[in-house]
Image (cartoon, rainbow, N blue to C red):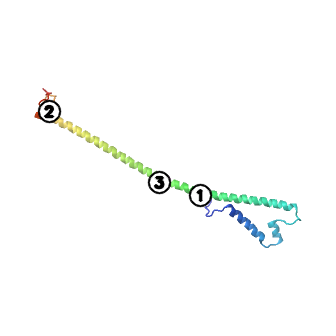
Amino acid sequence: MPPKFKRHLNDDEVTGSVKSERRNLLEEDSDEEEDFFLRGPSGTRFGPRNDKIRHVQNQVDEVIDVMQENITKVIERGERLDDLQDKSDSLSDNAAAFSKRAKHLRRQMWWRDCKMKAIIAMVVVILLLVIIGHRRSQGTALAVRGTTSSKPTTTELYGSDTGSRDALEVGD
């Protein structure tokens, strides 16, 4: 992974620094040999060779420009990769937190479901006990009265109210 750079260099800064360095080297007072190597041969004594050297120098300058652009692009790519890595780490952390919360919520809902089932089961058991207790109390009430007929009498059906004498007696 490429290192992080704190300052982004644009094309003008990179090419400008190379040109200024070249200019500084050419402007310094130097002897004729250094001028020959820095500027190339000058004068009419070299003729067509001078054009070839200038052509090669132009090609070298173009290659330098292309390489500077490539370096700039690599630096930008490194920065984008760093940003992508940061986003990936953040997403991974968020996914882990989401998974933890989902697991906690799943357990919470499971307990809530168990509690609801237990409450429903208790209600059903209580209803069964009430129904069974009611039937037993009716069965013991009949046994205590000592009735031998299987059909209930009017007083058993309607109670001992005197106002219900108009009712037909079912047991007789």
Residue that sits furthest to the top in the current view: 172
Using the rendered view, name the quadrant where residue 48 is placed: bottom right
State whether the magenta stretch is mostly helix, strand or loop: helix
* Cα–Cα gap, marks 1 and 2: 92 Å
Residue 97: which numbered mark, if any? 3
Crowd rating for badge 1 (residues with CA inside 10 Å; few <14, some 14–19, many 20+): some
| Amino acid type of the residue that numbered disc 3 sits on in the rendered structure | Ala
The secondary structure type at the circle numbered 3 is helix
The secondary structure type at the circle numbered 2 is helix
* Cα–Cα gap, marks 1 and 3: 23 Å
Q: Is residue 105 above or below residue 28?
A: above
Q: Which residues are magenta?
A: 94-98
Residue drawn at x 48%, y 53% is: 96
Say which label, 1 or 2, has the lower sequence index.
1
Direction from residue 19 to residue 45 in the image, left or right? right
Residue drawn at x 18%, y 35% is: 138
Magenta residue check for 6:
no
Say which label, 3 or 2, has the lower sequence index.
3
Residue that sits furthest to the bottom in the current view: 29
Q: Position of residue 42 (x, y in %)?
A: 85, 66
Residue marked by disc 2: 156
| Amino acid type of the residue that numbered disc 2 sits on in the rendered structure | Glu
| Amino acid type of the residue that numbered disc 1 sits on in the rendered structure | Asp
Crowd rating for badge 3 (residues with CA inside 10 Å; few <14, some 14–19, many 20+): few
Q: Position of residue 120 (x, y in %)?
A: 31, 42
Residue 82: which numbered mark, if any? 1
